[in-house]
C-alpha cells in the first residue's frame, strides 16, 4: 500500500538527466505504509501500546465541619513504581484544594494554571472566586482540549461565601457536584468503605479516620495505589487548611 502525496509537491525535481526529469514528472512521490491487512486496527493497537497505565486513589467528602480530602502517594505506570511520596493534594489558593488523578504532569500544570486564573479573577473583581466558578473554569478549559490526549480526573474542594463545595472535573470536560467523590483506579474499594461509614454529622476525628481507612483499604486491594495516606481538612471557620495525617 502506498500513500499518494502528489498534492504536496509544488513542482517536479529539476535535476539530473532529461530521462530522470521525465521519470520525475510521471511518477508521483510516495512513501511506504505499514504492511497491515487492517490499518485502522493497527492504529488502535499502536495507541494502546503507548498509552500509559495509571493508578491512584483520591477521595473527598463534605461533612458538618468542612471538607475532608485524602489521597495515596504512589506514582506508577503499569508495573513500574516511580515514587512513593507524591503530593496528590494540590493547593489552588488558601481556600481551595485540588486532587491529582490521571497524568501527573497534566494535573499539576492545569491546577497551577487554575490557581493563576483564580488570582486574576480576585484582582479584577475584588472578591475571591467561588468553588463553583473555579470548577466551571477548569471544566471549560479542559473541554477545549478534549480529544488531544490530556488525562485529568480531579476534585475541586473548598470553602466560599455560600459554604463548602465539592466538584468532580475530568479531561473530557465533565463536571459533577456532590457530597462525596472518589477518583482513580482504587476508587471502587474506597467507595465501599466511604459509603458504609459516611455521615454528615461526623466529628473531625471521625472524618479523618474514615478517610484514612478508605485510602488504606484501597491501597491494599489496588496494586497501582500505595505509599502513605495523606489527608487535609478545609475548615468552615477558617481559610487555613490543616494536615490531619500523613
Image (tube, helix red, strand yellow):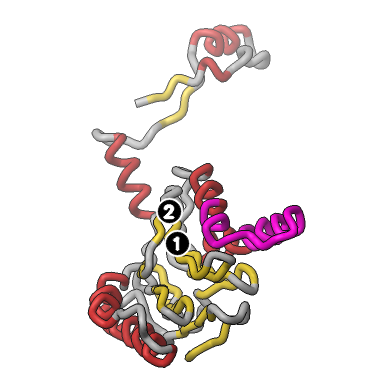
Label located before the other in sequence (1 or 2):
1
Q: Is 44 situated left or right of 142 in this image?
A: left
Location of residue 112 (image quadrant): bottom right
Q: Quick check: is 123 in the magenta stretch?
A: yes
SS at circle 1: strand
Magenta stretch, overall SS:
helix
- Residue at 58% across / 13% down in the picture? 20
Residue 37 screen position, x and y as percent: 24, 33
Classify the position of the N terminus by image quarter.
Answer: top left
| Residue that carries the numbered disc 2 in the rendered image | 175
Tell me, yes or no, whether the highlighted magenta stretch contains residue 15: no
Closer to the camera in the image, 90 or 32: 90
Q: Residue at x 30, y 35 (%)?
A: 40
Locate residue 176 relative to residue 164 in the image: left or right: left
Residue 139 in percent (x, y) is at: 50, 51
User: How packed is label 1: few (under 14 Cα within 10 Å), some, or many (20 or more)?
Assistant: many
Q: Position of residue 168 (x, y in %)?
A: 42, 60
Task: Tell me how far mark 1 sits from mark 2, CA to CA.
Answer: 7 Å
Relative to 89, residue 209 above or below? below
Q: Residue at x 55, y 70 (%)?
A: 159
Q: Residue placed at 64% from the left, 63% from the top?
A: 115
Viewer-closest of 78 and 167:
167
Q: Is residue 95 above or below residue 238?
A: above
Q: Secondary structure at mark 2?
A: strand
Is residue 17 shown above or below 208?
Answer: above
Q: Which residue is mark 1?
A: 167
The residue range painted magenta reads 113-136
Other-residue count near label 2 (Cα within 10 Å), few / some / many at <14 / 14–19 / ≥20: some
Q: Verify CB contact (< 8 Å) between mark 1 and mark 2.
A: yes
Amino acid at each position: 500500500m502506498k500513500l499518494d502525496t502528489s498534492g504536496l509537491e509544488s513542482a517536479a525535481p529539476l535535476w539530473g538527466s532529461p530521462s530522470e526529469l521525465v521519470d520525475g514528472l510521471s511518477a508521483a512521490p510516495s512513501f511506504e505504509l505499514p504492511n497491515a491487512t487492517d490499518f485502522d486496527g493497527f492504529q488502535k493497537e499502536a495507541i494502546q501500546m503507548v498509552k500509559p497505565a495509571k493508578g491512584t486513589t483520591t477521595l473527598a467528602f463534605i461533612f458538618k465541619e468542612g471538607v475532608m480530602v485524602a489521597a495515596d502517594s504512589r506514582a506508577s505506570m503499569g508495573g513500574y513504581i516511580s515514587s512513593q511520596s507524591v503530593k496528590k493534594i494540590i493547593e489552588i489558593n488558601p481556600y481551595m484544594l485540588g486532587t491529582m488523578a490521571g497524568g501527573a504532569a497534566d494535573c499539576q500544570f492545569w491546577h497551577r494554571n487554575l490557581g493563576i486564573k483564580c488570582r486574576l479573577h480576585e484582582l479584577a473583581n475584588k472578591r475571591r472566586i467561588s468553588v463553583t466558578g473555579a470548577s466551571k473554569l477548569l471544566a471549560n478549559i479542559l473541554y477545549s482540549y478534549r480529544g488531544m490526549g490530556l488525562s485529568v480526573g480531579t476534585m475541586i474542594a473548598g470553602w466560599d461565601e455560600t459554604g463548602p463545595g465539592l466538584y468532580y472535573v475530568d479531561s473530557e470536560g465533565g463536571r459533577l457536584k456532590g457530597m462525596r467523590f472518589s477518583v482513580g483506579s482504587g476508587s471502587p474499594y474506597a467507595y465501599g468503605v466511604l459509603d458504609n461509614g459516611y455521615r454528615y454529622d461526623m466529628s473531625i476525628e471521625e472524618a479523618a479516620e474514615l478517610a484514612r481507612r478508605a485510602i488504606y483499604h484501597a491501597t491494599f486491594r489496588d496494586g497501582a495505589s500505595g505509599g502513605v495516606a495523606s489527608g487535609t481538612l478545609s475548615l468552615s471557620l477558617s481559610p487555613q487548611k490543616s494536615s490531619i495525617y500523613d
